[in-house]
Amino acid sequence: MRLPHEGVSSQLELVKRCFEFVRDEIKHSVDFMLNPVTCKASDVLQHGTGYCYAKSHLLAALLRANNVPTGLCYQRLSVGEEGAPYCLHGLNAVYLEQYGWYRIDARGNKPGVNAVFSPPIEALAFPIRGPMERDLPEIWAEPLQCVIDVLESQPSVEQVLLNLPDVQLLD
C-alpha cells in the first residue's frame, strides 16, 4: 500500500491525498455492513473499515502526523429523510495555510453522496436540511465522549445503528 504522504510537494496535495485515501480506501461500516466496530485510528487502518466518526479519527491522525493542524467536527443530521431521530455525523476541519480552517468529510462516497476536496469551497457528504439539523461550529481536538462510548460499547455495526450518538441543541 502506498502511503498518501509519499512524494507530495505541497500542504494542499498532502491533505488531498490523505483525505482521498481515507474516503476511498477505508470502507464505511454501514455501506458495506462490515465489522468490527472501530474507533481508534490504528484499528480503522488495520481493519479497513469504520463509521464516519472512526474515519475522521484516522484522517486526523494521518494529517497530524504530517504536522497539519486538524480537528474533529460534527453535524447533527436526521437519521431518516427528515425529522427525528437525529444523530451526529463525524468529519474533520483542517487548517490550510492558504485558506484557514476548512472542513472535509472523508465518510466515503456513494450514490447521492459526493464529498470532495475543493478548497476554498466545502463539499461535504450531507447538507443541512431541516430546522433541527445543524453544522456544529466547534472544532474538537478529541472525539466527543458520546461518540467514543457508542463505538466502544456496541459489539456490531447493527448495534451501533440502533444507538447512534446525538447531542441536545442549546437553542
Image (cartoon, grey):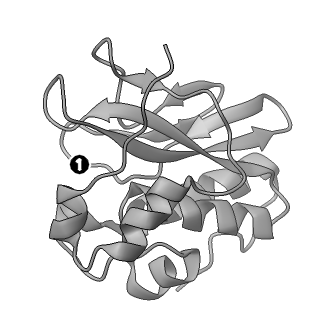
Q: Quadrant of residue 36?
A: bottom left
- Image vertical order of residue 77 relative to residue 73, above or below: above
- Tell whether 95 sits left or right of 85: right
The residue positioned 44% from the left and 34% from the top of the image is: 75
- The residue carrying mark 1 is 110
Q: Residue at x 46, y 52 (%)?
A: 106
Q: Is residue 26 visible?
A: no
Residue closest to the eye, 70 or 88: 88
Q: Viewed as shown, does residue 123 lie left or right of 164?
A: right
Q: Is residue 57 left or right of residue 46?
A: right
Give SS at disc 1. Answer: loop
What's the residue type where badge 1 is placed?
Lys
Residue 139: image quadrant is top right
* Residue 158 visible from this viewpoint: yes
- How many labels sit on residues? 1
Q: Position of residue 50 (x, y in %)?
A: 37, 69
Mark 1: give few (<14), some (14-19) or many (20+) Cα within 10 Å: few
Find residue 41 and report its horizontal and vertical position in percent: 56, 74
Q: Residue at x 31, y 49 (%)?
A: 109
Q: Toward the viewer: 27 or 136?
A: 136
Foreground residue among 111 and 88: 88
> Image height check: is 62 above or below 76?
below
Q: Position of residue 96 (x, y in %)?
A: 78, 39
Q: Nearer the viewer, residue 169 or 48?
A: 169
Looking at the rendering, which quadrant does residue 158 occupy? bottom left
Q: Name the spot of residue 69 as percent of width and height, x first.
A: 80, 51
